[in-house]
Image (tube, grey):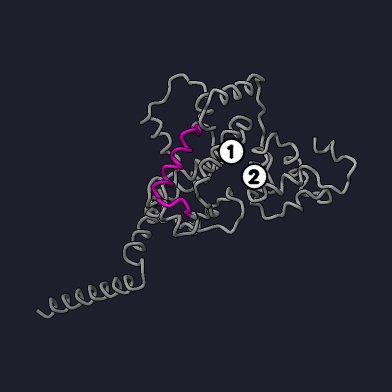
Amino acid sequence: MYELAFAGYPNYPSFLHLTCHFFSHYYNQSISIDDVLSPNNPHTFEYRSKLKDAKHFTDLIRTFQQPYPSQKHQHCSIKNEDHQSHCGKWILRGKKHFMHLISSQKPEPEGILEEGKLQQQQGEYLYSAVLLREAGVKFKVSLSTCLFDIEFDEKNGELKIPPLKVDDSTESFYGNLMVWEQCYYPNDTFICDYIFLMGYLIKSAEDVGILVRRRIMINQLGSPKAIVKMFNNLCKYIDVEKKNRYSSLFMKLNAYNAIPHHSWIAILKHQYFSSLWRGVATVAAIILLVLTMIQTIIALLSL
């Protein structure tokens, strides 16, 4: 309607341009929106096309979150036309949140996994932040503007994660994006994969504390336990049997965790060299122990 109403006014901005600037506070890419929307920039053609093809404002915001330059993923369209009408019916039935939509529409699989078995299956993927730190993994905040640009340096044992701000709107924001993603992009669930990863890293308030101290997480929600509860709620609606785009990252972290000397070095560092004075005290104790042993050996030899 907007394009038809202002078709004779070429100096007016397009509807896409207005919409992108209106939702610009959700945009987290390094390249500016104006550069993306510029028709003279051939490098942003694919990303610009995705913005134009957005089915809904939610879809547009989800596209804002995509890594840029976006990688080619296979988008799976909804096979059944009745699927969308069912979604509308479920919403009209008074669901309190979009998350309830997913739980309502997901078909019951044959032979549902028991809760203990499901947790065991999930536990094969990744350890929490506390356990990874005990295994020698060093958490570093990434300079990337894209939340999903998570990297692990196996040589230095550094896990680099972009900063995430958590406040009162975070759960509903990502919850709605996850529902939209699972409805329309079931084979390209990069937001669900990210929440799945963060959900495994955050299992306790101590895990939250590690990420906050490393400036990976900006806690504006208050209680660390509230953040744990939030990620637990979001992860309830993620299909753990699907392949995660971070699967290779999980394997690298688990392989790093399996090497014993990484844990030994981490324990030595955290328990005996966590601060300057503790390190000095540890070195002094070692020197004293060595001198005592030398004195004992000399005393025995003099007998």
Instruction: Compare residues 203 and 110 and report the one nearer the observer.
Output: 203
Q: Give me the residue at 67% from left, 47% from top.
A: 23
Instruction: Compare residues 84 and 199 and report the one nearer the observer.
Output: 84
Quadrant containing the C terminus is bottom left
Instruction: Compare residues 257 and 275 and report the one nearer the observer.
Output: 275
Outermost residue toward the right? 8
Local crowd size for mark 2, using a 10 Å CA cut-off: few (<14), some (14–19), many (≥20)? many
Q: Give me the residue at 35% from left, 62% from top.
A: 270
Q: Give me the residue at 46% from left, 19% from top.
A: 110
Residue 46 in the magenta stretch? The answer is no
Q: Is residue 172 above or below residue 102?
A: below
Tell me where residue 208 appears, x and y as whole percent: 42, 52
Dot 2 corresponds to which residue? 66
Dot 1 corresponds to which residue? 177
Outermost residue toward the left? 303
> Is 189 placed left or right of 121 in the picture?
right
Quadrant containing the N terminus is top right
Tell me where residue 108 appears, x and y as whole percent: 48, 21
> Is 105 placed left or right of 60 in the picture?
left
Outermost residue toward the front? 5
- Residue type beneath disc 1: Leu
In magenta, the rendered stretch is 219-240
Outermost residue toward the bottom? 302
Local crowd size for mark 1, using a 10 Å CA cut-off: few (<14), some (14–19), many (≥20)? many
